[in-house]
């Protein structure tokens, strides 16, 4: 029975990526899920691809390719970011949408999961072209998004300026104000206080809870952060302000390291001026590969997926990994980390602070309300701490990894909602 199922889900029509599927399969066996339950989780509810024309600065028209996957909406409207990346495929989007469904369930907010994006390198577009690509994509998917259907947000290489264009394009089409259609907006257009650094801060709340459990000495902990985009930079900034020592950071070009600790405010200025963290006078240049295996206690991958893999996992020296990126660890690396007893705080918990504050933004929009920063911060903290304790409690009870516990908690919540709806 299990073997048959195993074959089916790994056939060419198979749905989820190897890693997601392997987690799901383990749960299938462990939680004794029925094949109906597995089927329901294995397939996205709606998945679509669009092509749209953009009039480029050259005077020529170019066709662009976009995707959106609405994975599961049993717990509420689907929710998830939009990424602009040249190598984006429908498969990536589907896997990321699945992770969003789990993420919203882990932190117990009333959303399902979605993800979308355009296959484009935004660095090669002018500002005008970037705006037209954004608007073209939103026109192509406008029938399928909305505050009670599917709510986009920022993701890799998209920011609040792009969210403002999304809002404007959608409102032009509908002929009315609909601020709740997108989150991560500028504050002036109905965005929430603290949304811009909420993914990083939420991760730090989870990290602090984990440190209490592991009894790692906070003042001595050396931290390496891969990625200096919105999430990585804000994580470095807040950790530095809180008194942690950051010994290495990197961006897509390369990294910089200093065993005595980097001066993050100065490094941020350097990045602002030069466009990279490299060649900073307060440290020595290293590669991204060197950063991942550098001598540190806490490693924070905050860039793209599959950075920790078969080729480098055995050399990782950190005792704790906080996954601020989505899916930074391959299945092989995860196995190595378990053998090495490295505590991995999985993405669907570690980086959920972003979608938690997106939820607060949506609530404010639906109520025409406006919360002070303190209120947002307090609610973010209590949500992240409670979620950490839910997952950690299950991890101890079941004697399993944090990732397994988080998946288990999320899957149970989603299936419970499906049962209440009568779908199972
Ligand atoms: N893109 C972010 C994530 O992967 C945020 C999604 C949201 O706020 O909806 O969690």
Image (spheres, helix red, strand yellow):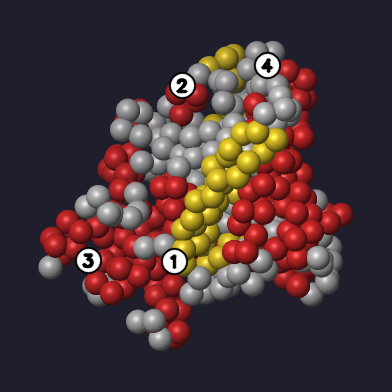
Tell me which numbered mark, 3 or 2, is placed earlier along the sequence.
3
Cα gap from disc 4 to disc 3, whole angstroms: 51 Å
Q: Residues within 10 Å of mark 1 (few under 14, many from 20)?
A: few
Q: Which residue is mark 1?
A: 45
- Whether ligand 1 has any atom under 8 Å from the Cβ at mark 3 is answered as no
The residue that appears at 83% across and 71% down in the rendered structure is 369
Residue drawn at 40 percent across, 86 percent down? 422
Q: Which mark, residue 326?
A: none
Q: Are marks 2 and 1 in contact (CB under 8 Å)?
A: no
Q: Is residue 234 visible?
A: no
Q: Which residue is mark 3?
A: 29
Asked if the residue at tag 3 contacts the one at tag 4, i.e. Cβ–Cβ closer than 8 Å, the answer is no
Element under label 4?
loop
Where is 391 relative to 315, above or below?
below
Mark 2 vs mark 1, CA separation in Å? 41 Å
Asked if the residue at label 1 sits under 8 Å from ligand 1, the reply is: no
Question: Mark 4 — residue?
Answer: 280
Instruction: Give the percent coordinates (x, y) of residue 394.
Output: 39, 67
x%, y% of residue 351? 56, 51
């Amino acid at each position: 029975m299990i073997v048959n199922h195993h074959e089916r889900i790994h056939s060419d029509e198979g749905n989820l990526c190897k890693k997601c599927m392997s987690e799901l399969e383990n749960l299938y066996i462990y939680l004794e899920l029925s094949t109906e339950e597995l089927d329901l989780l294995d397939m996205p509810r709606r998945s679509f691809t669009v092509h749209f024309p953009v009039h480029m600065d050259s005077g020529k028209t170019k066709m662009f390719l976009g995707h959106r996957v609405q994975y599961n909406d049993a717990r509420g409207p689907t929710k998830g970011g939009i990424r602009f990346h040249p190598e984006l495929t429908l498969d990536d989007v589907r896997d990321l949408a699945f992770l969003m469904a789990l993420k919203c369930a882990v932190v117990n907010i009333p959303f399902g999961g979605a993800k979308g994006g355009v296959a484009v390198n935004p660095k090669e577009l002018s500002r005008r072209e970037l705006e037209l690509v954004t608007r073209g994509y939103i026109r192509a998917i406008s029938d399928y998004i909305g505050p009670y259907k599917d709510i986009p947000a920022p993701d890799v290489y998209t920011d609040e300026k792009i969210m403002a264009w999304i809002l404007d394009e959608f409102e032009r089409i509908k002929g009315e104000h609909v601020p709740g259609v997108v989150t991560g907006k500028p504050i002036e257009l109905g965005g929430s206080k603290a949304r811009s650094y909420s993914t990083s801060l939420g991760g730090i709340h989870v990290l602090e809870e984990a440190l209490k459990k592991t009894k790692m000495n906070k003042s001595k902990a050396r931290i390496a952060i891969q990625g200096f985009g919105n999430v990585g930079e804000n994580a470095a900034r807040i950790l530095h302000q809180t008194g942690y020592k950051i010994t290495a950071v990197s961006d897509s070009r390369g990294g910089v390291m200093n065993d005595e600790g980097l001066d993050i405010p100065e490094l941020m200025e350097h990045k602002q001026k030069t466009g990279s963290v490299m060649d900073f006078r307060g440290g020595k240049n290293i590669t991204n590969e060197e950063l991942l295996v550098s001598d540190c206690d806490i490693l924070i991958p905050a860039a793209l997926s599959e950075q920790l893999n078969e080729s480098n996992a055995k050399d990782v020296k950190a005792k704790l990994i906080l996954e601020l990126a989505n899916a930074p660890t391959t299945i092989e690396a995860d196995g190595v980390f378990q053998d090495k007893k490295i505590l991995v705080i999985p993405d669907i918990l570690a980086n959920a602070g972003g979608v938690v504050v997106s939820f607060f933004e949506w609530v404010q929009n639906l109520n025409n309300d406006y919360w002070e920063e303190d209120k947002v911060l307090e609610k973010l903290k209590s949500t992240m701490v409670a979620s950490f304790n839910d997952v950690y409690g299950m991890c101890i009870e079941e004697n399993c990894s944090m990732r397994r516990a988080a998946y288990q908690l999320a899957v149970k919540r989603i299936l419970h909602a499906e049962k209440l709806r009568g779908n199972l």
